[in-house]
Image: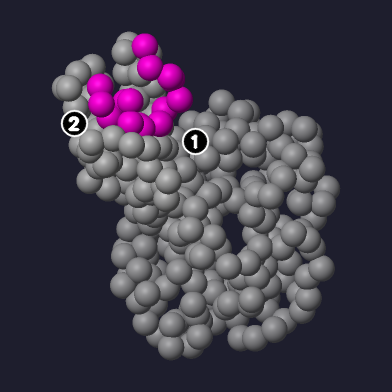
Amino acid sequence: MRAFGIDVSRWQGDFDFAKAKAEGVTFVIIKGGGGDDGLYVDDRFERNYAKARAQGLHVGCYWFSKALTAQQAKEEAAFFYDRCCKGKQFDLPVYIDVEHKSMLALSKKKLTDVILAWLTYMESYDMEPGVYSFLNAFRQHIDETKLGSIPRWVASWSKTCSYQPLGIWQFGGETNLIRSNKIAGVVCDQDYMLTDYPAQIKAAGKNGFAVTEHIPEKKEECEVKLPVLYKSCSGGYVRTVQILLNAYNSAGLTVDGVFGAATDKAVRTYQKSRKLTVDGVVGEKTWAQLLK
């Protein structure tokens, strides 16, 4: 695939997403905030997110990092998740933007460790994280062997880009060798998406999209036929489990119907207290105990 999109921040001002869509834009990656001036949220983030979603565009998000240690990376990721990602849906990856000169002055190992700490934190909250940087940074400053299948968003302002694996290619900004550097009358960084991230992220239940509750085809014999629930499930049955765990074990769970890390931990604690198999799966035996 080769879908056309843009990335925007406060520098594009009150951006006209409807006009951008009419000009062929199908996706947008919005700046969430950064760590280069303390920890902050981009002052156009909320409006850009709402307006892009209203136009039916695919939406991703990025964080402009200045983390120099793994601990700083975790702190940035926690702020980014809490202030920009939590409660929202992104059908494109959420990216750490690695281009600040102080980060690029680190050794390859230290910079890669910083990136991995940020990615790991985001993954712990069922996010699909990726890495953005320019072509030379990927080749010279980052140990790519440590990134595995992590999505790459590569800036190479040229007519072609042979980098692999290439998920999204930022082919132009102020300099654009392929088309006009303006979208909706404003200079924008422009991108081609070469991987179908919306389909992948929704299917995996990442970035705020819930996996449909799963009822196995082969059901165990039990009087009450309830679904087997596990981490990444969502919906009414998960809310029931959260209410019961709060009642039995004072788990302190937010009753939101999302089987995330906190619910998984509470289930395991409950299973241990009832001498059940501690696997984080709410199956027949765990349901039976909860419903007593």
Q: Position of residue 99 (x, y in %)?
A: 66, 50
55 is within the stretch colored magenta:
no
Residue lying at 64% horizontally and 36% vertically, measured from the top left? 116
Residue 93 falls left or right of residue 33: right
Magenta residues? Answer: 275-289
Front-lying residue, 223 or 121? 223
Residue at horizontal 56 percent and vertical 44 percent from the top: 65
The correct choice, above or below, for 53 with respect to 80 in the image is: below
Amino acid type at image mark 1: Ser
For the C terminus, the image quarter is top left
Quick check: marks 1 and 2 in contact, CB under 8 Å? no
Q: Determine which residue is flagged by label 1.
A: 124
Element on which disc 1 rests: loop
Q: CA distance from mark 1 to mark 2?
A: 23 Å
Mark 2 closeness class: few <14, some 14–19, many ≥20 residues within 10 Å: some
Residue type beneath disc 2: Ile
Residue pointed to by mark 2:
243
